[in-house]
Image (cartoon, rainbow, N blue to C red):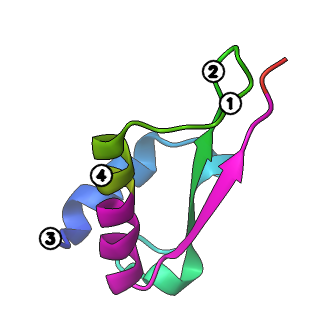
């Protein structure tokens, strides 16, 4: 739900470096990217449990429906 008054109040609490646009403007998914970063376990294998894969896929599809760019990144485990 889009609530301009709430966005204005939150924007007032943010430092200038974290403000984004006019709180009265609609949010456009095309202007944002959501990145899911996954780090492998200590064995250096990247394997998500089945239901985690399902949840990740559903979240990505939902974000895509809202026109957000969705990416997946693999973070190496030191």
Determine whether the residue tagged by mark 4 lies in a helix, strand or loop: helix
Q: How crowded is mark 1: few (under 14 residues within 10 Å), some or many (20 or more)?
A: few
Q: Distance between the residues labelled 1 and 4?
A: 20 Å
**Dot 2: few (<14), some (14–19), or many (≥20) neighbours within 10 Å?**
few
What secondary structure is marked by label 3? loop
Q: Which residue is drawn at 61% across and 49% down?
A: 18
Q: Distance between the residues labelled 2 and 3?
A: 37 Å
Q: What's the CA distance linking mark 1 and mark 2?
A: 6 Å
Magenta stretch? 57-76
In which image quadrant can residue 64 be found?
Answer: bottom left
Eye-nearest disc, 1 or 3:
1
CB under 8 Å between discs 1 and 2: yes
Give the residue number, with chain letter if any, for mark 4: 55
Label 2 sits on a secondary structure element that is: loop
In the rendered image, which quarter contains the C terminus? Answer: top right
- Do tag 2 and tag 3 residues touch (Cβ < 8 Å)? no
Residue annotated with mark 2: 41
Q: Can residue 66 be seen in this view?
A: no
Q: Marks 4/3: CA distance?
A: 23 Å
Q: Mark 3 points at which residue?
A: 1
């Amino acid at each position: 739900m889009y609530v301009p008054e709430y966005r204005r109040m939150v924007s007032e609490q943010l430092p200038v470096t974290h403000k984004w646009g006019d709180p009265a403007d609609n949010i456009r998914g095309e202007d944002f990217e959501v990145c899911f970063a996954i780090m492998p376990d200590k064995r250096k294998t990247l394997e998500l449990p089945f239901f985690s894969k399902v949840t990740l896929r559903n979240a990505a599809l939902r974000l895509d429906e809202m026109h957000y760019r969705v990416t997946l990144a693999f973070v190496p485990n030191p």
